[in-house]
Amino acid sequence: MMGIVKGHTHRPTFLQSVDDNRRATNSLYTTSESFMASPSTLPSTVIDYTHDTHIFQESLNESTYISKLSGIRGAVTASRNHTFVQSAESSSEGIDVATSAQNPEFKLPSWSSLYLGGSATFSGLTIGIPAFISGLALIFVTKYDGGQYNMPLNFAYASMFLGNILYALAYRASFLYLILIGRIVTGCGFISFMYSKRYCSDPRIVGVRRRTTLAGWLVIGQAFGFSAGPFFGGLLYKVGFANQVFNGVTSPGWVIAIIWMMFWGLSNLIFQDVPPQRLSAQSIELSTTTLANDQIQTEQIPKSTLREITLPQWGVIVCMCYYSMTCFFMLGSWEANIPVFTAHALGYSPYNAGNFIALGGIASVPFLLLNVWYARRIQDRIILAIGSSLGTIGLVIMLSILKASKVNFGSLFVCWFLVALGFNLASTCTLSLLSKQLPDTWNRKVSMAIQYSNYTGRVAGAILGGSGVKIGMVNYVAVQLAVVGLGGVMYMTLWKQLKAKTG
C-alpha cells in the first residue's frame, strides 16, 4: 500500500504531462464558454484565445498523446448579429473541443446575397452581353423587316418577356448560367432601341421639323428609365420577400417580365405601323408592263448608293456617330463608376449608390422637358453644343474636386447632374440631325450606324467606369475629357455643315 501511495505521489513524467495537458484543455473549454456568454468582448477575447491556443499547441510536442489533441478545431464564427456558434466534437478521450476565431480578411456576406456565387468577371459579362447580342440580331432582323415595325417590335417584346423570366428563375434553379442565358435572350429585345429611334425619324410619317422633338421625348423616357430602374431594383432588394421564387434578388426580373407582357398587349392594340415602303422613283425610268387583270405595278424603290453622299455629308456622318458614341460612353462610364467610387470615397452601399444615380437622372428630367419645347426653335447644332458644354463642365468640376480632395455628396452630385443632363441632352439630336442631312432612303442605314455607335460607347464606357478607381480617378476623368475634346474639334471644323432645320 505504501508503494502504491508513493507511486501515486510521485507519478511518472509522461502521466504528469497527460494531466497537465488535460487541465490546459479544460481551461480552454471554460474560456470558450465565457465567449458564448459575453459576445460583447469579441475583438480582444478572440485575439487572446487564438494566441493562447497557439501557445498551448506548441507546449504539446513532447509526448505521443499530443497527436490526439492536435485534432482540436476552431469553429467560433461571427454571424450578422455577432453571436457565436460552437461546434464541439468528442475524441476518444472526450477532450476535442471546437473553438476558434474568424479571420476578418476572409469575411463574406450571406450566401443568398452572393446570388449563386458569380464572380465580378461573370457579372461584367452579363451586363455587356445584351449589347453584343443585339448588334448581331439587328443584322438579321433588319434584313427581313420590310421597312416596317410590327414584326421586329413583337420579336423584341417576346425576347424581353422570356429573358427576364429566365433571369428570375436562375436563383430557384441554382444554375448560374441561366442568368447569362436570360441576358442573351434579353439582348435580342434590345433591338427595340434602334427601331424606336428609327420610327421617330422615319420620313414616311415624321416631318423634318419634328424629328428632334420626338427624339427629345425618347430621351426623357430613357432618362426616366435609367433613374427608376436602379431605384426600384434597390427597393425590391431591400424589401426582400423571403421566398425561393420571388425574393429581393429575383423580384426585379418577375416585375419587369410582367410589365413587358402588359406593354406587349397594349402595343398590339394601339400601335399603328407605317404603310409598306413605297417611294416615288424620280431619277429612274420605270418599266411598264400591262397585266391581264389591269393590276397596277408596284413602284420600284431606288437603291441608295455611296455616290449620293458628298464629302461634307460624310464628315457629318462621322461627327454624329462619334457624338452618339461619346454620349453613351459618358453615361455608361459614370453609371458603372458611381457604385465603385462612392463605396471607396463615401462608404456607400450598392443601394445608396443606386439611389444616387436615380437622383441625378430624375433631376435632369425637367430640363429635358424644356428641351422638347425649345427644340422647335433652336438648331440641332446649338442643342449639341449646349449639352456637350454642360457635360464638360461637370467633368472639369470633377477633376477639380479630385485634385483638391473635396469629394462629398454635394460636390459629386453636381458633377453627376451636369454629366447626366448634358450628355442626355446632346443625344437627342444625333440621329435627327443626321436624318435631316441625308436622303430619306438612308434612314435605315443611319439608324443602324447611330445604334452601333451607342452600343460601342455603352460597352467601352462600362469598362472604363468599372476600372476608374483602379487606374486612378484623375486618369479616369482625363480620358473622358480627351474624348470630349476630340469631339469638340470635329464639331468646330464642321460647324457650317451641321446646320439643319429646327424642330
Image (tube, rainbow, N blue to C red):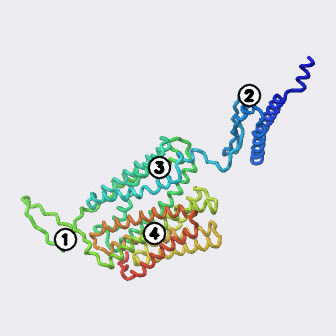
What numbered label is drawn on residue 94?
2
Please name the residue that numbered disc 1 is placed on: 281
Q: Nearer the viewer, mark 2 or mark 1?
A: 2
Compared with 30, 302 (above or below) is: below
Q: Quadrant of the rendered structure where residue 148 is?
A: bottom left
Q: Position of residue 62 (x, y in %)?
A: 78, 35
Q: Nearer the viewer, mark 1 or mark 4?
A: 4
Please name the residue that numbered disc 4 is placed on: 327
Sequence-earlier tag: 1 or 4: 1
Q: Residues within 10 Å of mark 2 (few under 14, many from 20)?
A: few
Sequence-earlier tag: 3 or 4: 3
* Residue 82 visible, this orientation: yes
Q: Secondary structure at mark 2?
A: loop
Compared with 467, 11 (above or below) is: above
Q: Secondary structure at mark 4?
A: helix
* Residue 377 visible, this orientation: no
Q: Give the residue type at disc 1.
A: Ala
* Whole-number angstrom distance, CA of label 2 to CA of label 1: 98 Å
* Whole-number angstrom distance, CA of label 2 to CA of label 3: 52 Å
* Whole-number angstrom distance, CA of label 3 to CA of label 4: 28 Å
Please name the residue that numbered disc 3 is placed on: 253
Dots 3, 4 in contact, CB < 8 A:
no
